[in-house]
Amino acid sequence: MSGNGCTAASRSAARALRECQKSTGERNFLESSEALELIASGVPRRAGTWADLGAGGGTFTLALAERLGAGSRVYAVERDTRALAKLKRAAAGAAAEVITVAADFTAAFELPGLHGGLDGMLIANALHYVGDAAVTLARLAQRLRVGGRLVLIEYDRPGANPWVPHPIPAAQLPALAAATGFSTPIVTARTPSAFGGDLYVAAADRLAPA
């Protein structure tokens, strides 16, 4: 992830980060343009096949579709079928193909029409709901092609609260990545959180099996 408009020095990116804080772990309060600012430095601007895991109402799904552009595919994986229906309507005019998948990303699920591995996956304000992040990430890593990108948006805080029950401190990212088959993550954005600690954006790539 190469600092590309998503730092504290960027007013638009900083605004997006503040909006993420206000969401108390939910993603759907952001405008797509702000979400795009937030993910731009981690998602290459080229056609590819990505998954937005825990997609909610699709704010980041639409941002991914815009970032990747024509010829791309974005799988929006979300267990809330009502949210998926809203997302599907909103994505009707997206540049990339958006495929909704009603599933819990922490369990087994299928990505229809996928041949080979994903080019990338985004998990934004969702992994902190998972009790064992290492188990989930290790399984999800198998969905990525070697070199595929993981973009993670999470809270860096010392303790849990109702909105962040299983925080993932940035200091734990290198060990978490090493244990789950990813390169050392790069943290490219950080801002103080109204709920304690910081909000950060990080990216890592899937490593070839040893």
Image (spheres, rainbow, N blue to C red):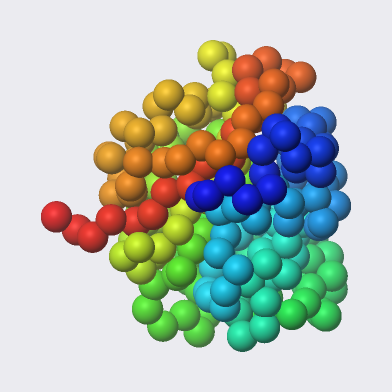
Q: Point out the image quarter for the C terminus.
A: bottom left
Q: List the single residue furthest toward the front.
A: 9
Q: Position of residue 145 (x, y in %)?
A: 35, 68
In the drawing, does residue 108 fall left or right of residue 23? left
In the drawing, does residue 125 fall left or right of residue 168? right
Which residue is at the front of the view, 63 or 113? 63
Residue ID at (70%, 32%):
8
Q: Position of residue 120 (x, y in %)?
A: 49, 63
> Does residue 83 lie above or below 74 as drawn?
above
Examine the image and state in which quarter residue 46 appears: bottom right
Residue ID at (58%, 19%):
157
Q: Position of residue 164 (x, y in %)?
A: 63, 27
Q: Position of residue 183 (x, y in %)?
A: 33, 47
**Would residue 104 be visible to someone looking at this image?**
no
Residue ID at (45%, 70%):
118
Examine the image and state in which quarter residue 206 appears: bottom left
Which residue is at the front of the view, 36 or 20? 36
In the drawing, does residue 69 fall left or right of residue 136? right
Which residue is at the front of the view, 208 or 130? 208
Which residue is at the front of the view, 166 or 200? 200
Q: List the single residue furthest toward the left.
A: 210
Q: How many marks?
A: 0
**Would residue 15 be visible to someone looking at this image?**
yes
Residue ID at (57%, 78%):
47
> Does residue 68 lie above or below 182 as drawn?
below
